[in-house]
Amino acid sequence: MKTLETLIILQARMSSSRLPNKVLMPILGKPMLAHQIARLAKIKTPNKLIIATSKQKSDDAIATLCKQLNISCFRGSLDDVLARYYHAAIEHNNDKKIKNIVRLTGDCPLIDSDIIDNVIELFLTTKVDYCSNCVPATFPDGLDVEIFSLAALEKAYLLANKPSEREHVTPFIRNNPALFTTNNYSHTLDLSHYRWTVDEAIDFELVKQIYQALYEKNPSFKLNDIVQLI
């Protein structure tokens, strides 16, 4: 059995200012977050998945869903998401085997497991501190993947002090090339003009229509299936 060196942390909260409760809004009778979790189950790289939410009462519903789906849930700071990631990683590293952290966000229900595997592979083969597919972006907004070493996360947690660095987890790593080595996984075609993340009601409507068109024939529909549909 392969050692589980990769921890996937999916951050989610109910208190979105533009579209409150969006992560649990229903698509084909299931919460949006449940669909995203199902898509992450297709990742081939051995991993452990946890949902990182806040201690706010409004996020009790996310913890309840995790319990129903038998998915680990960590609850931490609402605004200091960098601290939430760090403490989630430490709490789930009892056997000291976790070396890499994948960061995903709960507003990306079209996330593609193949792309995640490819970003992880590039990270591992090039032995950098941080790798993503969004600096610069060539994939649709909503298919973002970031992976970084646990050591890089700890260094960012200890040194980052700007509010933007604490809220968005990885800016400190990306903005300090003297401290961290980085790489980027790019698509052959620039598809960054597509917007598939869910921030507002119009975004949710698009995602819902994509699911309605593709899910029944193939619940694991991929990037190319969506591009073809659009």
Image (cartoon, rainbow, N blue to C red):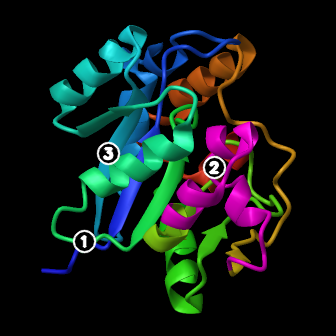
Left/right placement of residue 15 relative to residue 30 reads right
Number of labelled discs?
Answer: 3
- Residues in magenta? 154-180
Q: Can you give x and y, in whole percent of width and height, for residue 4 in the image?
A: 25, 71
Q: Residue at x 71, y 16 (%)?
A: 200
Which image quadrant: the C terminus? top right
Quadrant hosting residue 15 = top right
State the residue position of label 2. Answer: 143
From what the image shows, is residue 133 above or below residue 188? Answer: above
| Amino acid type assigned to the residue bearing label 2 in the image | Leu
Q: Can you give x and y, in whole percent of width and height, for residue 30 in the image?
A: 35, 20
Left/right placement of residue 58 relative to residue 229 reads left
Q: Can you give x and y, in whole percent of width and height, for residue 33 in the image?
A: 42, 29
Q: Residue at x 37, y 48 (%)?
A: 87
Distance between the Cα atoms at labels 3 and 2?
Answer: 18 Å
Q: Which numbered tag is attached to residue 50?
A: 3
